[in-house]
Amino acid sequence: MVITLPGYASTHDAASRGEQIASLRSRLAGRLVMAGDAGYDELRQVQDVTLDRRPLGIVHAANADDVALAVRYARDHGLALAVRSGGHSMAGHSMVDGGIVVDLSGLKRVSIDPLLRTARVQAGATSGDLAGPAHDFGLALSTGDTSSVGMGGLVTGGGIGFMVRKYGLAIDNLLAARVVTANGDIVTASEDDHPDLFWAIRGGGGNVGVVTELELRLAPVGHVLGGVLILPASREVLRGYLEYTVDAPDGLTTLANLMHVPPAPFVPEERVGELVLAIHPCWAGRFGAGERALAPLRALAAPIADAVSLIPYPRIYDFTAHQAVRHGWSMRSTFAHALSDAAIDASLAAMERATSPYSIVHFRGLGGAYARVGNEETAFAHRDKRYLFAAIGVWLDPTEDATPHRAWTEALWQQVRSEGDGVYVNFLADDGPRRIREAYPEATYARLAEVKRTYDPHNLFKRNQNVPPAPRAL
């Protein structure tokens, strides 16, 4: 007798499994890549350089039908299923041992309608893939901080980007999406079609389906004031940044990293390695107004370097290109209504004893258009939060002992966590169910669980920040 447990591979013999895999391979327009096949080791690499998982098969999808075939195959054979878009999952959910990976990285088509100011973007396209074609028509969308972030994972988590205070989250500009459900159906979700699903994919992560294509509203953005403003790190500079950034004009979005400044053409050689606050501004609007909006930041202290200028929007990613390099990380993050001087002092002290020269403490001011959407309108429900804070231990060598870096992150987190309120699901590591509850307020969590019950009652899509389906009423 053969017993198959949910979530585990069947005990069919190897020959039977081989026939099943061959059947799947023959039906795909894309490729099924397995151990020993060309490209297997390349395709199983993700952003986290320490992650070394070996899936049974990677479906390098050519279209939504391939995704549906892979979903049905994993469901019918009791196999774990992971979905890879850009591979930036903080929790390592993009890859799975012994299961099936739906690899969306081949779905990169971007189509711009300059008259309607919309884009159709396949889920494997990255922020950089969209930014260039949109810029050709003087248009842009606020997306990820790094050009290599995949649109599928970014948008389903919310999408806090370089123009979030001007144009809101990426999900606030989502008009419709093609979604593969746990049944293997391909549906369109929008305000008019499957509105419950549309609500859930805007912040619910990968819980209710695999998004294969997005229709997005673009904004008229050509050039921006962007780059990096590097200031000496101090409590006064950090406090000044935090107090200004959330109340600045909406056209100014910033993120700031407390870090040890690396070599760069615009950094004086004698200042390399110094502890600094590196502010990345992005002003979308008239140049003169942008200069006035930036003036209070420039006045916080005598800059070590000021590399902010009028640039084409896609060039904003030149200043975060180092983040696209594969690395190991340990991350703890939170939203906050306020950050005290004690939190600032703890961050400064932590950076003085950082275990890696690449580690950072990240601060981001919110507000503006981000805050003018109701918490109940999308599954992303933290519109009232003013700040995002993250302690991020970073190292590059996969053979390096991660223990001290993780301990460094955890020590700072323990000093700051009491000031937090909620967490951005895309910045959440593999921290367990309690932290997932913090990503979704109680009413949001309950509604997401109800939608999950409708579209994925057996929790096939569980390799994510998982919200199990609500139990059926008796």
Image (cartoon, helix red, strand yellow):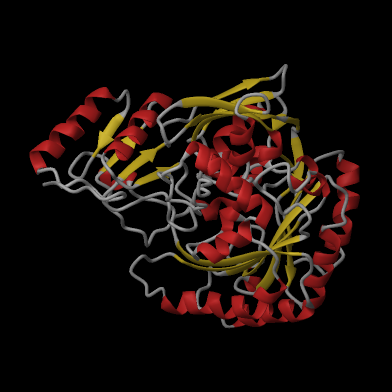
How many numbered marks, from 0 up? 0
Counting from the top left corner in percent of width and height, residue 181 is at 46, 33
Q: Residue furthest toward the top?
A: 115
Question: Can residue 354 be seen from the camera position used here?
Answer: no
The image quadrant that residue 434 belongs to is bottom right
Q: Residue at x 43, y 64 (%)?
A: 396
Counting from the top left corner in percent of width and height, residue 160 is at 67, 48
Q: Is residue 342 above or below residue 186?
A: below
Please name whichever residue, 150 or 255, is drawn nearer the observer in this view of the structure. Answer: 150
Counting from the top left corner in percent of width and height, residue 170 is at 67, 40
Q: Residue at x 83, y 58 (%)?
A: 246
Please name whichever residue, 465 or 371, is drawn nearer the observer in this view of the structure. Answer: 465
Q: Residue at x 26, y 50 (%)?
A: 5
Question: Can residue 421 be seen from the camera position used here?
Answer: yes
Q: Is residue 431 above or below residue 199?
A: below
Please name whichever residue, 229 or 350, is drawn nearer the observer in this view of the structure. Answer: 350
Q: Residue at x 84, y 39 (%)?
A: 285
Horizontal arrangement in the rendering, residue 331 relative to residue 106 (left or right)? right
Q: Is residue 69 above or below residue 82?
A: above
